[in-house]
Amino acid sequence: MTARIAVDLLGGDHAPAVVVDGALRAFQDDPSLHLILVGPHDAADAVLAAVEPAQRDRVGTLPMPAVELHPDDAARASLRAVADGLADAVVSAGNTAAIVVSSARALGRWPAVRRPPLAAVLPTAAGRLVLLDVGSAVDPDEHTLITHARLGAAYAAVAHGVTEPRVGLLTIGTERGKGDRLRRAVPQLFAETDLPAGARYAGLVEGHDVVTGTAADVVVTDGFTGNILLKGLETAYARLGPPGGDPAAVPPRAALLLGVAGTVVVCHGAASGGDLADGIAFAARMHRRSAVAAMADLIPHNEVTP
Amino acid sequence: MTARIAVDLLGGDHAPAVVVDGALRAFQDDPSLHLILVGPHDAADAVLAAVEPAQRDRVGTLPMPAVELHPDDAARASLRAVADGLADAVVSAGNTAAIVVSSARALGRWPAVRRPPLAAVLPTAAGRLVLLDVGSAVDPDEHTLITHARLGAAYAAVAHGVTEPRVGLLTIGTERGKGDRLRRAVPQLFAETDLPAGARYAGLVEGHDVVTGTAADVVVTDGFTGNILLKGLETAYARLGPPGGDPAAVPPRAALLLGVAGTVVVCHGAASGGDLADGIAFAARMHRRSAVAAMADLIPHNEVTP
């Protein structure tokens, strides 16, 4: 099944070189992948120059003038390509806040979603674990965390086939009264919330539970804490190996934006070419299994508390 | 040099069994270690029963009636033992908030220290890294983070012999404007603050810097984020090995309470006997090198902003 991925050539600390590298890798690995290269034409030309003539129809370009081009412009144009039906998904290693805001504007947010969260997937000895938010909502209130819990549950069900996902709230101790002001307010709200996909609230979890994976399939936190924990653990795993033991089972170092009406994959600013290639393949996978539509089906709009 | 360590027999999820185990291990490993066992007499008796008669003068007990004993009572009594000069240091795996508050009351806080922070030491490929706070100040303001930066710098200088420690602020991106409300307020304050021990502000750091250790010797964050990152990384390292490669170089899984006039070591609630033994040995080491007094010398009271 064809997947047309809009690639932000300007996103990331090492753009466009690593983006060109990653796009080419993903392109070679997947004969049904089409690229829409968004950004300065010289970067797009570097990809085109490396593509066999017979494959040229799999590469489109949306060139942008290099003069007065802001780094976020290519991400915005990539998102418009999806909104206009020219592409099936976006991959960017650009500025997270800009991508989140532009995604919400270009694609639309689902009801009740104030700040679309970024969901990462981490390897654990017990399988894959969804951690969200990892960088979008840095000062959320308790209602935002509950909305993210619902989105995370739908994601685990759709992407990992988890039946009745267990959703935990990340905090610093499981005794009553532990945690900061925000975290102390959330458990009561969980008790009043219906989670989708048969998910259930698994209670308070701690940092070690994100490594072991035994207490929850989905771990909800604010985007500040989640980003720091994700970057710490990913760096540890990159050096030491994943806790499950199988390097091939490591999820992509890329996050899916949830709660917007389209497939948006965000890679680290410091992503390598290999990370970008993984992110592009991941976006294609999410598109091919209609993950966003399947999640939307699990969260009927009339069930979402506005 | 003798070190008299008051051990909270009631602290921790698996007290008193693992505390008894840890106390005995530490006792056997260090012929100059004296234990003051604080808590129910039957737990203390379990230690005494395993001690050679010739060594009995190295074990004191402060028995407490088991009836109506709150789990935090033994920690409080242990701290009073230090305040009264009966012990040189306290080790507890009990409730963090209770220990922090009781320590401040029993031993006194240094000027300007509102909430004494817990400082953990993490292994990195580049050496030891001080992470603070890891569980005490869960909703700090920016002035509290600056005070903790000063304490952390003094700790790195005294405990690890770091000259001119580099102090980083943990956040989620090094571009201007990144981070949550709290973090955006702090860098300006750093510019106006004199750090002790020749330390300098090394700027914004991210989760991966806590693993690599290349950007900073001391990493400052709130107690919520720090606790979650610490528990995640410690669990990863326990499974995968430390990033420096040498298991013998792994710091104890115990945190030192800074900014109080005494040596207080806090172990995880889920600490094992080995962790408790490491914590006791660590407390003895800190006492023997007069670490608290040396830190106080580096932070003259009249230099501390009240």
Image (cartoon, coloured by chain):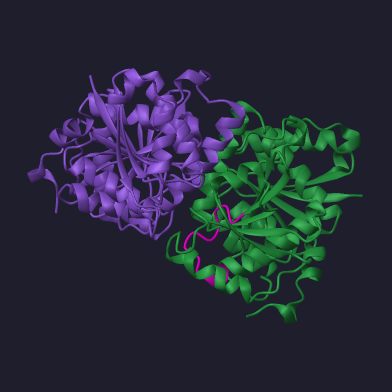
Chain colours: A green, B purple
Is residue B172 visible to us here? Answer: no
Residue B206's spot in the image, x, y percent? Answer: 46, 41
Residue A267 seen by the camera = yes
Is residue A137 highlighted in magenta? yes
Magenta: predominant secondary structure element? Answer: loop
Q: Is residue B148 magenta?
A: no
Q: Nearer the viewer, residue B92 or B127?
A: B92
Residue at image coords 85%, 44%: A33
Image quarter in which the C terminus of chain A is found: bottom right
**Figure check: B15 above or below A25:** below
Question: Is residue B23 shown left or right of residue A168?
Answer: left
Position of B304 relative to A97 (above/below): above
Residue drawn at point x = 36 percent, y = 57 percent: B182
Q: In the image, residue A15 lies at what x, y percent?
A: 59, 39
Question: Magenta segment range?
Answer: A132-144
The residue shown at (33%, 53%) is B73
Q: Nearer the viewer, residue B48 or B239?
A: B48
Query: Looking at the picture, how far across and down is residue A78, in whole percent?
Result: 69, 55
Labels in figure, total: 0
Q: Is residue A302 above or below residue A221?
A: below
> Please, which residue is most extreme toward the left here?
B302
Relative height, residue B185 to residue B242 (above, below): below
